[in-house]
Amino acid sequence: MVDTPGAPGRALATMPLHAVTEVYGEAGLRGRFALEIADLPEHDRARLTAALDLAARLHAEQRRIREPYLNHLLRVTIRIKHYYGIDDPDVLIAALLHDSVEDQPYALAGVPVNGEPPREAALARLAGEFGPRVATLVASVTNPRYAPDRDAHEQYREHVAAALDRDPWARVIKISDFTDNGVGVIHATGPKVVSSARKYRPLVPILRELVGRPDTPLSAGAREHILDQLDLAEVRFAAILDES
């Protein structure tokens, strides 16, 4: 049983992730995360708990519109475990920390905010605490600094295509991240809705092609689930952009 007021463990385990978020908030997502990793070996659970604690500290002051930023990281990770059927602790740890180097490099590296973001030092800390594979996965899904004279969204899509072409496991993390940001755009409000639809809509065919590649480490069922989610994203983006 998970200690989430009003949310028995069995019911919590069956709820869509955004429903968990809306009804129970961060506490519910933490409870769902605990349920999802309960079947893993004790050593893996300890590593994942340490990664969650680090993510919570790094992103403590960060928010996504109406919610703590940690909610996004938890949903991305839970989706990989529950819907994609992936138990690999390195992949799950990298999912929890996938925005740490991009958003919180100074805190992660343990240096004052000054000058160029210390991304290499931040990645070195991840490698030291969780292993080089985790750091490599996080590096693959970390957006570069964009050239100011070019469209940032176009550069983002170019980076995603290039990085995921090289790293099949990073595809898994980015696809879950996209699902939360893209398919989940319907849960956003204000100008963020239209800007997100414009940013993410051109990425759908790129991700669809990557999901279909033989070296993408997903089961047939997970691929089908993801393709359904990409179709749903297309429908939502079209509705949002047509209205705008």
Image: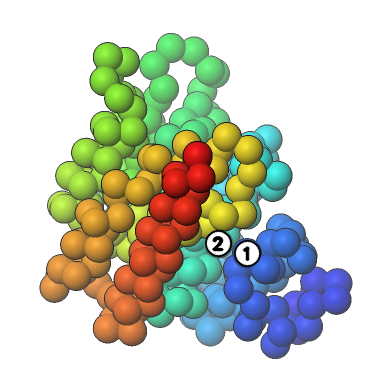
**Residue type at the position of mark 2:** Arg
- Which x, y percent locates residue 48? 52, 63
| Residue shown at the point (72%, 61%) measured from the top left | 22
- Depicted 100 relative to depicted 207: above or below: above
**Residue sitting farthest toward the front:** 243
Q: Which mark is residue 75?
A: 2
Q: Nearer the viewer, residue 232 or 169?
A: 232
Q: Which mark is residue 18?
A: 1
| Residue shown at the point (57%, 55%) measured from the top left | 186
| Residue shown at the point (52%, 68%) measured from the top left | 78
- Which x, y percent locates residue 118? 40, 25
- Which x, y percent locates residue 101? 43, 37
**Residue sitting farthest toward the right:** 5
Per the image, label 2 sits on a secondary structure element best described as helix
Between the residue at mark 1 and the residue at mark 2, the CA separation in whole angstroms equals 8 Å
**Residue type at the position of mark 1:** His
Q: Nearer the viewer, residue 171 or 148?
A: 148
Q: For this view, does 142 lie left or right of residue 52?
A: left
Q: For this view, does 33 lie left or right of residue 22?
A: left
- Mark 1, Cα crowd under 10 Å, few <14 / some 14-19 / many 20+, is some
- Which x, y percent locates residue 205? 24, 56
Q: For this view, does 38 lie left or right of residue 66?
A: left
Q: For this view, does 168 lie left or right of residue 103?
A: left
Q: Which mark is residue 128?
A: none
| Residue shown at the point (51%, 23%) measured from the top left | 111
Mark 2 and mark 1 in contact (Cβ < 8 Å)?
Answer: yes
